[in-house]
Amino acid sequence: MKELLRSTDPVRISRVLDLLDSEGIPAFEMDQHMSVLEGSIGILPRRVMVADRDEFMARAILRDAGLDD
């Protein structure tokens, strides 16, 4: 697995996951339950992970959509 994105913005993460899903690229959100430990204030970033084989295409899709860092 490769880290594709790290963000504290849940809307951005949701958009990225939906965009990748619509292109047939499976993605996994990590650290989504860390808000329990931080008190739900949103300071710990969540990560979007993809399989190694999908990283190049996923980065290209995010770049085309203007969602790359």
Image: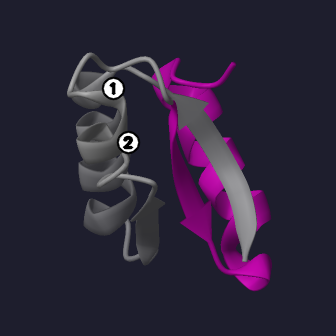
Residue 59 lies in magenta, yes or no? yes
| Tag 2–tag 1 contact (CB < 8 Å) | yes
Instruction: Report whether 66 appears left or right of 15.
Output: right
The image quadrant of residue 2 is bottom right
Q: Which residues are magenta?
A: 45-69
Residue displayed at 68% across by 74% down:
54
Q: On the rendered image, what quadrant is the C terminus found in? A: top right
- Label 2, on which residue? 16
- How dense is the environment of label 2, judged by Cα within 10 Å: few (below 14), some, or many (20 and up)? many
| Magenta residue check for 44 | no
For label 1, the residue is: 12
Q: Position of residue 12 (x, y in %)?
A: 33, 26
Q: Compared to 26, does 57 lie above or below?
A: above
Vertical placement of residue 53 versus 41, above or below: below
Identified at 36% across, 31% down, the residue is 38
In the image, what residue type sits under mark 1?
Answer: Arg
Quadrant in the picture for the N terminus: bottom right
Task: Left or right? Give the position of 63 relative to 14.
Answer: right
Which of the pair 1/68 is nearer the observer?
1
Circle 2: residue type: Val
Element class at badge 1: helix
